[in-house]
């Protein structure tokens, strides 16, 4: 009973790999070492102030072990530490009793950090250091805010920016751009028309009314990824290799536009992957690319009508745009054969992609998945799900 209770007191931290643990430890080593060495060079060896203040160790935990945390972002560390240092120095100067000054400083620091959106837990220790740092810190007065606090914070932040990004961890964690309907309408993107939406998450967090050490956008991403994983489990692990077309019509960058257009018409398709001689994917050409090249006149207006279309075709033949390379889209989103089809839903539904080339490990085209393929696979997967999971489980046991 006691052992069970003690286990419940342990935090339920998400598991991480040994590599990530080593990355965090190495990052703290590099960050604190660089901060200390550069502070020593900047302030000189004979400075009376400490070159490193203790709260920087706590800041290093957040910046290198939890870089996506909203408490570890640049404004959090710089704003939180400087604001708390200023408050700590102020209470140290005007409140004689160190215990009362400490309590007021930490309390006021938390309140101001919350108001300014720069909450950083180690900053509470910065405020406490300013009050209890002793005669050396007190003698500096408000200069303590600039150095070592400001200098330490900026140097540790610079080290985190460099180290995290070099080791594959995006930092800082920028707010994502708002998702826009690619069709230019006011409708939400398809994946936000059912299930939970960001506003639902915001409402729940507001009702929860506690600080969550995960940003709302990061939490939204994790929940959507969990939904995709759940669908992958229910859909029977269907991958691109199961549904893709393998006999793919492709063109080269130097293929004449007339020949590429004939392929689109003859095969009744809307897109052609563009490949190099060795089959490597280098782009894609679609009916939209052809329309953009042939129907837009020099004045930028769209001209229709059979006479104009004939004139456009003649003009297209005279212009320099006569090969696929002139009109193709070069930045192509692709998938691997082992990619689960559930992962194709967001780009195809929200980004307006109608075709997804499938490539091997060497980026050579081995197939293509269309929206029709995806819809058919999703329909088949849904139709094969039992209406009554409990009855299906009983049937399985009976078998």
Image (spheres, helix red, strand yellow):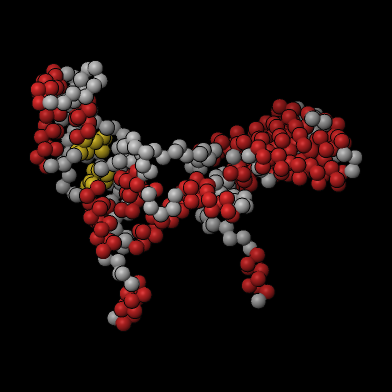
Quarter of the image for residue 31 reads: top right
Q: Nearer the viewer, residue 352 or 62?
A: 352
Say if 196 sits above or below 79 in the image: below
Say if 105 sits above or below 230 in the image: above
Asked if residue 13 shows in the view, the reply is: yes
Q: Residue furthest bottom?
A: 398
Q: Nearer the viewer, residue 118 or 128?
A: 118
Quarter of the image for residue 254 reads: top left
In the displayed structure image, the side of residue 239 where residue 295 appears, left or right:
left
Q: Residue furthest front?
A: 186
Q: Quadrant of the N terminus?
A: bottom right
Residue 330 pos. (x, y %) = 28, 32
How many tags in the picture? 0
Asked if residue 34 shows in the view, the reply is: no
In the displayed structure image, the side of residue 199 where residue 37 appears, left or right:
right
Residue 9 pos. (x, y %) = 65, 65
In the displayed structure image, the side of residue 113 where residue 304 appears, left or right:
left
Residue plotted at (27% across, 56% down): 378
In the displayed structure image, the side of residue 80 where residue 256 appears, left or right:
left
Residue plotted at (26% across, 66% down): 384
Q: Nearer the viewer, residue 281 or 222?
A: 222
Residue plotted at (68% across, 74% down): 2
Say if 376 sits above or below 356 in the image: below
Q: Quadrant of the C terminus?
A: bottom left
Residue plotted at (31% across, 34% down): 331
Residue 14 pos. (x, y %) = 54, 57
Quarter of the image for residue 28 reads: top right
Residue 373 pos. (x, y %) = 22, 51
């Amino acid at each position: 009973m006691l052992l069970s209770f003690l286990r419940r007191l342990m935090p339920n931290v998400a598991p991480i790999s040994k590599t990530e643990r080593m990355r965090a430890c190495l990052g703290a080593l590099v960050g604190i070492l660089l901060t200390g060495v550069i502070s020593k060079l900047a302030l000189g060896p004979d400075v009376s102030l400490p070159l490193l203040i203790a709260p920087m160790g706590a800041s290093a935990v957040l910046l290198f072990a939890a870089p996506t945390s909203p408490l570890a972002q640049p404004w959090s560390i710089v704003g939180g530490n400087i604001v708390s240092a200023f408050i700590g120095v102020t209470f140290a100067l005007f409140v004689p009793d160190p215990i009362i000054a400490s309590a007021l400083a930490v309390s006021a620091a938390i309140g101001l950090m919350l108001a300014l959106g720069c909450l950083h837990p180690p900053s509470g220790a910065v405020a406490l250091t300013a009050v209890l740092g002793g005669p050396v810190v007190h003698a500096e007065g408000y200069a303590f805010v600039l150095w070592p606090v400001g200098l330490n914070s900026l140097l540790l932040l610079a080290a985190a920016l460099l180290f995290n990004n070099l080791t594959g961890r995006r930092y800082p964690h920028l707010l994502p751009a708002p998702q826009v309907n690619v069709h230019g309408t006011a409708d939400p993107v398809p994946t936000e028309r059912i299930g939970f939406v960001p506003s639902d998450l915001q409402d729940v967090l507001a009702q929860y009314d506690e600080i969550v050490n995960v940003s709302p956008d990061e939490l939204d991403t994790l929940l959507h990824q969990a939904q995709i994983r759940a669908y992958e489990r229910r859909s029977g692990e269907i991958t691109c290799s199961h549904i893709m077309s393998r006999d793919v019509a492709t063109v080269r960058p130097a293929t004449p536009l007339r020949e590429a257009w004939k392929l689109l018409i003859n095969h009744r398709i809307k897109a052609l992957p563009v490949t190099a001689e060795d089959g490597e994917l280098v782009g894609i050409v679609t009916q939209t690319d052809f329309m953009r090249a042939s129907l837009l006149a020099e004045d930028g207006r769209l001209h229709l009508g059979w006479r104009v279309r004939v004139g456009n075709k003649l003009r297209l033949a005279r212009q320099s745009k006569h090969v696929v390379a002139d009109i193709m889209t070069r930045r192509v989103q692709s998938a691997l054969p082992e990619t689960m089809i559930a992962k194709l839903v967001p780009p195809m539904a929200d980004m307006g992609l109608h075709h997804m080339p499938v490539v091997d490990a060497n980026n050579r085209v081995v197939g293509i998945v269309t929206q029709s393929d995806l819809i058919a696979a999703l329909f088949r997967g849904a139709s094969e799900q039992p209406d009554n999971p409990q009855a299906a489980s009983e049937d399985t046991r009976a078998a």
